[in-house]
Image: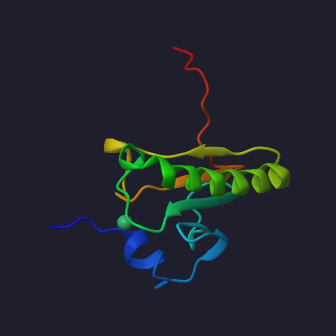
Amino acid sequence: MSEPDWYCDQVIPRAIDVDVVAETDDVLAFRPPIRGFGTEHVIVVPKRHVRSLLELDPALGAELLRVTQDVARQVVDAHGGCQVLTTLGDEQHNRHLHLHVAAGEGVARFVRRKD
Ligand SMILES: [Zn+2]
């Protein structure tokens, strides 16, 4: 059974409505229809299938990072800060590389454990 790929199946072909924040020939940045986390949440993906950060080629990586940088700058300007993160292995639920740019209430807080 092939794994469902929401990005290749729905988002990139625009089978669903997403709020596009930035787009280049190779990269799409959008707000998901259901906010995953944060008061601001933008997802940045390569428009061709790349399984994860570990399979990303450096040329596409540079473009992905450039778009992510533009989006993150806008989010920092609007919200004072943000997180940029991607997931890998067992932590990655959709097997299409995606970066989250998220700010505000609901984002993960990387704080030192007290125990
Ligand atoms: Zn894909």
Q: Nearer the viewer, residue 57 or 76?
A: 57
Looking at the picture, how far across and down is residue 4, in whole percent? 30, 68
Residue in the image at 41% along x and 67% along y: 48
Q: Nearer the viewer, residue 105 or 67?
A: 67
Above or below 25: residue 95: above
Quadrant where ligand 1 appears: bottom left
- Asked where in the image residue 108 lies, by quadrant, the reply is top right
Looking at the picture, how far across and down is residue 57, in whole percent? 42, 49
Count every numbered label the image shows and give the total. 0
Residue in the image at 35% along x and 48% along y: 55
Residue in the image at 20% along x and 67% along y: 2
Above or below 83: residue 22: below
Above or below 52: residue 13: below
What residue occupies the far left of the structure in this picture?
Answer: 1
Looking at the picture, how far across and down is residue 28, in whole percent? 57, 68
What colour scheme does the image use? rainbow
Residue in the image at 49% along x and 55% along y: 60
Quadrant holding the N terminus: bottom left
Q: Nearer the viewer, residue 12 or 64?
A: 64
What residue occupies the far top of the structure in this picture?
Answer: 115
Q: Is residue 82 left or right of residue 110?
A: right
- Asked where in the image residue 82 lies, by quadrant, the reply is top right
